[in-house]
Amino acid sequence: MRPTRLLLASALLAATSAAAQTPAAVDRGARAVQAEVVAWRRDLHQHPELGNNEVRTAKLIADQLRRIGLQPKTGIAHTGVVAVLKGGKPGPRIALRADMDALPVTEQTNLPFASKVTSTYRGQPVGVMHACGHDAHVAILLGVATALAAQQADLAGEVMFVFQPSEEGPPNPGEPFGAALMLEQGVFRDFKPEAVFGLHVWAGLPVGSIGVRAGPSLASADEWSLTVRGQQTHGSRPWDGVDPITVGAQILLASQSLIARQVNIAATPVVLTAGQFNAGVRFNIIPDEAKLVGTLRTFDAKVREDVIARLRRTAEDLAHASGATAKLDVVNNAPATINDPALTRRVLPSLQRAVGAERVVEMPMVTVAEDFSQFANAVPGVYFFVGSTAAGTDPAQAPINHSPQFLLDEGALDVGTRAMLQLTLDYLGQPSP
């Protein structure tokens, strides 16, 4: 990943006209909460919890929100927490979101606060680690809430703080992810923001920098499963049955040709990957069934539908040719994250003001997915990245998010806090001194 500098002329003009240093209101707020943000992040990192099980995390969040005078609602989408800060003056309504869950990953860092937590995930014993940085997201949003509450009387508008469970996925297949369930349970029903914002710490960027992109930013994530039914027979007499393993292999290879030869990936990226291929129990028995499971990543809804239709047709036709059957099931875990272009242009000067225009870069489209997109489909949204790799380390060589060696430079906590504070105060119309 080699991001290039944003060349949006209007935004650069706005950034150039702003003061070179961070405005005083943001600087005071960030400095006041900096030590707490670091302490919260370390505590959460040492005590990670998997999706829909973020009980301790939710209590820590709710306790702090009450401490600053808010009245959090808990138990939304199992463990989600939401609170609204009403400013002393009328103004717009916005939402700020942080995800809370950790991953089934055994930590391999030497941090003094490294996780030693173990759990069970989908029937398997696992280590648990904040390998994606959600501990940082929670700590940053708690810091922003605390800093904003301290100047509540001067705020023009209302801010909803959304602490979302299960961004990485629920413990049981087929259950809704956290953002979709929060919306289903009415998180935006009584408080409908006009905009929603989120951030993600990112190993692919150096600490001190911010990455953002207007339009398609992160991919849609589909989980697909393909069941091939044949006819069991002895391995020495394959002609007496129908081999689903061979058919499954043909479909797998054809799926890659499908992307290479039938989809215009020059127009929009598409990734089709199989992560599992399971069949049989014995070396000399051809089984009745083979199953492939994988993921599809796209940035355009029509392209997504076309690829799914092509994969289904390819699988069914190849199976039919061999006397087998093939059934494709697809579950969308998150639609593509598309940053609203007008909103991105509006908040870009705030991000530049927070860290300096030269440190804000344009991200390429990223084929990972994020269910922040559910919120951004309900109201206009912007999602940006905060660099987390220490100075002196090439981000291209650093352990990526989800790695057991993922290592966050804590300078990213201050950058994220300042960026979200600046964005919020600017959006609410707080004049910069």
Image: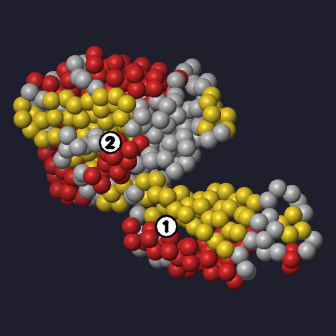
Question: Which residue is most to the left?
Answer: 89
Element under disc 2: loop
Q: Residues within 10 Å of mark 2 (few under 14, many from 20)?
A: few
20 and 293: which is toward the camera = 293
Image spot of residue 108 (x, y percent): 63, 32
Q: In the rendered view, would you say 263 is above or below 74? A: below
Image spot of residue 104 (x, y percent): 59, 37
The image quadrant of residue 430 is top left
Q: Is residue 320 visible?
A: yes
Q: Are marks 1 and 2 in contact (CB under 8 Å)?
A: no
Question: Which residue is most to the top?
Answer: 67
Task: Tally the numbered discs.
Answer: 2
Q: Which residue is mark 1?
A: 270
104 and 170: which is toward the camera = 170
Image disc number at residue 185: 2
Residue drawn at x 32%, y 45% is: 183
Residue drawn at x 47%, y 35% is: 52
Left or right: 31 with respect to 120? left
- Which of pointers 1 and 2 lies earlier in the amino acid sequence? 2
Q: Amino acid at mark 2?
A: Gln
- Give the color scheme: rainbow, by chain, secondary structure or one colour: secondary structure
Q: Residues within 10 Å of mark 1 (few under 14, many from 20)?
A: many
Residue drawn at x 90%, y 63% is: 284
Left or right: 233 with respect to 307? right
350 and 168: which is toward the camera = 168
